[in-house]
Image (cartoon, rainbow, N blue to C red):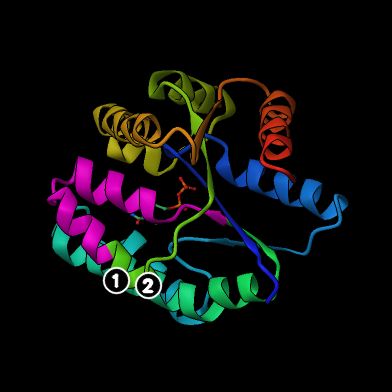
Amino acid sequence: MKKGRFITMEGVDGSGKTTQLQLTARYLLDCGYEVVTTREPGGTKLAERIRNIVLDADAAVNPRTEILLYLAARAEHVEKVIRPALEAGKVVLCDRFADSTLVYQGFVRGIEMDKVKALCELATDALQPELTILLDAAPEALLQRRADRGVKDRFEQEGLDFQKKVREGFLLLANADPVRVKKVNALQNTEAVQADIQKILKDEGF
Ligand code: TYD
C-alpha cells in the first residue's frame, strides 16, 4: 500500500499560517508530490457547515459544546478527506488539527487535557500528523503587524491575553514533542519563514 504523509500547520491567529500553507503546497508540488491542502474546522461540505456554526457562535458558547462541534467536523474530515488521501499516497497539508483543540479547548478554555486527548483520539480514529509546523510569534508583535496592515478580525476580538495563552499552550506542546513539532519564527518576512519551512521539510526527507 502506498503511504501518504500528513503534515499540519499550527499557530496563534494571525501568524500567517494560511499563506505559508499555500507556499508550502506549491513547494511540495514542485518537488513532485501529489498534495492535498485542507483546513480545520472544515474540509468537507458538512465540516464547513459546522465551521460556520462554530466560528459564528456567540463568544459565550460553552467550551464543551464548542469542542464537540470542532471534533464532529474533524471526524468527518478525517474519514472523508484526510485518510483517503493518505491511503492514495498523497501529502496532506492541513491548516490546524488536534493540537489546536488541545490548546484552545484544553489549555485555554480549561477542559481537562486527558479528556481532550481522548476525545481527539476518538474523532481522528487515532490519526496523528508525522510533522507539525508551529508558526510562533509573540502576539503583541503580530497585533502591531496587523494594525500596520489595517487588518481587523477575531484576533482583536479575543484580545491579547487570550492570544498569549494560546501561544503558551502551543509552546508547551512543542517542547513536549520536539521531534514532531517544529517551531518557526513567524515574525520574519514571508520568504524567510518559507525558507525555514523548506529546510525542515528537507530534513524530514521531502
Ligand atoms: P481560522 O479562520 O482557521 O483561524 P486562523 O486563520 O486564525 O487560523 O479559524 C479557526 C479558529 O478556530 C481559530 O481561532 C482556532 C479555533 N480552533 C479551535 O478553537 N479548536 C480547534 O480544534 C480548531 C481546529 C480551531
Which label was assigned to residue 122?
A: 1
User: Range of the magenta residues?
Assistant: 94-119
Percent from the top left, x then y, of residue 205?
Answer: 72, 43
- Answer with left or right where residue 36 lies relative to residue 113: right
**Of 21 and 152, the residue lying toward us:** 21
Which label was assigned to residue 4?
A: none
Image point 30% across, 27% down: which residue? Answer: 164
Image point 37% across, 72% down: which residue? Answer: 125
Secondary element type, mark 1: helix
Percent from the top left, x then y, of residue 172?
Answer: 31, 31
Q: Quadrant of the N terminus?
A: bottom right
User: Mark 2, residues whose alpha carbon is within 10 Å: few (<14), some, or many (≥20)?
Assistant: few
Let me know if residue 103 is in the magenta part.
yes
Image vertical order of residue 69 relative to residue 60, above or below? below
**Of 182 and 67, the residue lying toward us:** 182
Percent from the top left, x then y, of residue 17?
Answer: 56, 42
- Answer with left or right where residue 31 lies relative to residue 100: right
Q: Is residue 1 visible?
A: yes
Disc 1 residue type?
Leu
Which residue, as the protein is rendered here, is positioned at the far front? 1
User: Mark 1, residues whose alpha carbon is within 10 Å: few (<14), some, or many (≥20)?
Assistant: some
C-alpha distance separating marks 1 and 2:
5 Å
Secondary element type, mark 2: loop
Q: Are marks 1 and 2 in contact (CB under 8 Å)?
A: yes
- Answer with left or right where residue 196 lies relative to residue 102: right
**Of 199 and 107, the residue lying toward us:** 199
Image vertical order of residue 184 relative to residue 5, above or below? above
Which label was assigned to residue 125?
A: 2
Percent from the top left, x then y, of residue 126?
Answer: 38, 66
Q: Quadrant of residue 55?
A: bottom left
Instruction: Decide if ligand 1 comes within 8 Å of the CB at mark 1.
Output: no
Image point 59% across, 62% down: which residue? Answer: 38
